[in-house]
Amino acid sequence: MLTRQTIILTAPSLLARAPSVRRSGHRVGVSSDTVRLTSAVRAPFYRREIGTVTFGELLERHEREIFAYVLRLTGSRADADDLYQETFLAAFRAWPPPRAGNERAWLYKIATNKAIDQVRRTRRLVPLADLRLAAPERDGVTLSDLATAVRTLPTGQRAAFVLRKVEGRSYAEVANALGCSEVAARSRVAEAMKKVKEAVR
Amino acid sequence: MNALEPLVDEAREHLLARAKREGLVRVGYGIMDSPLGPLWIAVGPRGVVNIHYGVTPDPRELARITRAYGPGVLPDRRSCDRVLTELDQYFAGRRKRFDVEVDLAPLTPFQQRILMATARVPYGELTTYKVVARQAGNEQASRAAGAALGANPIPIVVPCHRIVAADGTLGGYAGGLPAKRRLLALERGKAEVPAGGWERSRR
């Protein structure tokens, strides 16, 4: 393992000194070592020059990162699963990627647009104003006060509050996300709401 | 990051199912852990398109596959099931002939004739580049035959390891000469092919 890594690290300089090795050394190679190592070394060079040629490569290179991203965006495994699929299917339908070597930014853009579409399609966001926390008679309340109040809630209540009041999800979805009953979800949201109101008063 | 892995796998399964329903997957690939080391295997609509010694595809082979079938080349072990089973049986000495279809369509007619002649060489037997060249219609072309075999996209299944030089030396092999030797030994029933592959047993 160690030797292989060492060789890969030093290989570019070897190649620079003997450029012909790169072309002829691949298949006709003298020993099996040569064959294995040259092909191991060649791959990254090739990819940087040509970019992605198959959908599988695009997927294998970026799927973890994109999944993590959509998971952060949605906060839900089911939605992340959907978004991941939508993102890669859209990428595939729009094939090829716009510029070689720029697939990552392209995928992020698609994922972000798909996330916005998903939000528009599935739920109406409840504006913060509707919380009546920043009503005119309480002008002194700022968003940062509100954020602090939310932060100090116990975890379960905080999640329920954010899902329902910030992200505008249904109580069924909140219950699903928190793994509790709908009644429990309602009471957590109500409890959280009460505490937040008290905190910013 | 590790906790994410099963979620991504699951999402990928869903994606694959959808992509298949929509006809976007043309070629599915998987990696096999063979006694000769890992093999990268791709199967298209008309059969096996590529077997490559290694965990990643050969860029030139990938380009060839993409030219023939477009970018719909996806990780999909299921499409490789049949060839994986046959390879397992072959390495265990329980299969002397492959029944799985191979897809030589993206190759030149000469390459195809050479590989078809190669596929007729029986298990455990050897022939020379010259004989294969003659069967492909040009006895003078033994060097070209060697080149075509060196570029064999489907080694093992198309048994290019059974072709040797006329002077009795082994010739070449894309998977390395030790791999060629061990395939021939396996077919003569002389040696077990121990698990772990030629990489570890080299020393």
Image (spheres, coloured by chain):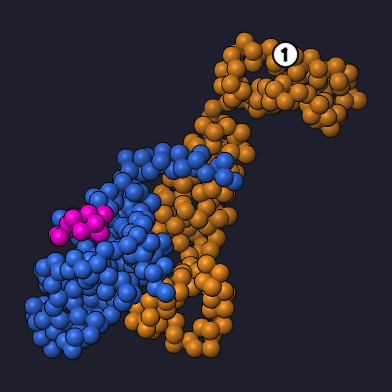
Is the residue B123 above or below the residue A148 in the image?
A: below
In-image side of A174 versus A57 (left or right): right
Residue at x-position 11% and y-position 68%: B122
In-image side of A13 versus B148 (left or right): right
Residue at x-position 29% and y-position 63%: B193
Tell how many labels. 1
Is the residue B197 above or below the residue A90 in the image?
A: below
Is the residue B74 above or below the residue B49 in the image?
A: above
Near-viewer residue (B53 or B96): B96
Q: x%, y% of residue B166?
A: 16, 87
Mark 1 residue element:
helix
Residue at x-position 48% and y-position 65%: A51
Magenta stretch: includes residue B89: yes
Q: Is residue B133 something one can see in this rendering?
A: no
Q: Amino acid at mark 1?
A: Ala
| Location of residue A165 (image quadrant) | top right
Q: x%, y% of residue B81?
A: 27, 48
Mark 1, residue position: A190
Near-viewer residue (B3 or B161): B161
Check the picture and name the quadrant holding the C terminus of chain A: top right
| Location of residue A129 (image quadrant) | top right
| Location of residue B90 (image quadrant) | bottom left
State which region is magenta.
B86-98
Q: x%, y% of residue A98?
A: 50, 59
Q: Which chain is orange?
A: A
Q: x%, y% of residue A6?
A: 57, 74
Magenta stretch: includes residue B147: no
Q: Which chain is blue?
A: B
Q: Residues within 10 Å of mark 1 (few under 14, many from 20)?
A: some
